[in-house]
Image (spheres, helix red, strand yellow):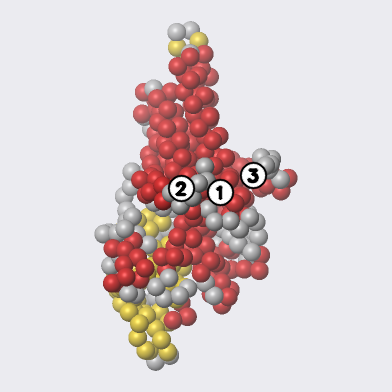
Amino acid sequence: MNFELSQEQKILQRSVREFCARAIIPHAARWNEEARFPMEVIEPIAQLGLLGIHIPERYGGAGMGMLDLALAVEELSRADASLGLTVASHNLLCMDHIYLAGSEAQRERYLHRLASGRALGAWCLTEPGSGSDAGAARTRAVRREGPCGVEWVLSGSKSFITQGSVAEIYVVLASTTPARKQKGLTAFVVEKGTQGLRPGRLVEKMGLWASDTADIVLDDVVVPDAQRLGQVDQGFVDTARVLDRGRIGIGAWAVGIGRAAFEAARSYSQQRVQFGKPISEFQAIRTMLADMATELDAARLLVWRAAVMQDCGQRTTRESSVAKLYASQAAARACDAAVQIHGGYGYARDFPVERYLRDVKLAEIGEGTSEIQKLVIAREVLKGSRT
């Protein structure tokens, strides 16, 4: 077991950190206050190779691995959780679904555009009436014979879609056999500009104000069968594979936010003087910092374990859920403690820790709530005797 990053991974980590210090951190608070998606930074992020980092080079990606992606997402999320979420969802939801379930022609058609940053991707699963219960999806895809062969008509709506109003390429899950519930879902690629596809309302959120989140409306959207991803009624099976990898990204995303909160709290505790000495010298503060550091270290190692297992071609349903569950909870505790260490200033908008606390809550909800992760983990551990 080797916990040492390779030289190439250290260079990647340092490069992303330096890029964030130069191009993201100075602007993150303003982007957040403006509640504006910072499209101007997408091209520089793409030039670093971060919009297709784990996609093979033959499809325009950087040809790296899941651990490399986890490192990059952590660094980006430490700088700006909104942009970290953009990169994680673009790579691990939209692109991964196309890469894992798509044909060679679909990979060639879409992945080059996504990896280069010429197009952002969105993944459309959640609906107003179906969050954790994918089988309750009401968006329908009806097969018919068109003038150019088989085509599908998609009708319905999706909600809470990251990159919902700025994406160019959407992966949409729709019910093709409603009686089969989640076993009757099929995925389709729908491009911006397709008649009947339009963004709905922009969602006003508790946090992540610079992340684009919108509803999607599909009003009799017609797509050819060539834009069907994978087999009919196999969309949920492919979605499970996508989420095994996506949850690693959310774990890394949470660790990045928690790390930002920890570093802010550590710095503040060394500068804030009370009763004639820095508050970092008080036992209560030291205990809080020790807990934050320990839990974030543990969370990072769980994320790295799942990522390395993916890079070795192993199934990680359990490990991905463990990483996502623990990292999201550890990061939430770290952000809460950072606000507490800042005292009244932590509750004010003068310091970034209140933003970290608002942003990190999504980690316990998105890509499967903490409660769903526990169900997944329990199901997996009951299958065998692994500890």
The crowd level at tag 3 (other Cα within 10 Å; few <14, some 14-19, many 20+) is many
Q: Is residue 142 above or below residue 24?
A: below
For the residues labelled 2 and 1, the Cα–Cα distance comes to 16 Å
Which numbered tag is attached to residue 381? 2
Q: Secondary structure at mark 1?
A: helix
For the residues labelled 2 and 3, the Cα–Cα distance comes to 34 Å
The picture places residue 106, in percent across and down from the top left corner, at 53, 75
- Which quarter of the picture shows residue 151? bottom left
Q: Amino acid at mark 1?
A: Ala
Q: Of callouts 2 and 1, which one flags the residue occurring earlier in the amino acid sequence?
A: 1
Hey, which residue is sitting farthest right in the picture?
Answer: 7
Where the N terminus falls, by quadrant? top right
Residue at the image point whose x is 41% and y is 65% from the top: 236
The residue that label 1 is drawn on is 306
Q: Secondary structure at mark 3?
A: helix
The picture places residue 376, in percent across and down from the top left corner, at 41, 51
The picture places residue 341, in percent across and down from the top left corner, at 43, 23
Nearer to us: label 3 or label 1: 1
Which numbered tag is attached to residue 13? 3
Q: Of callouts 2 and 3, which one flags the residue occurring earlier in the amino acid sequence?
A: 3
The picture places residue 224, in percent across and down from the top left corner, at 43, 82
Residue 214 visible to the viewer = no
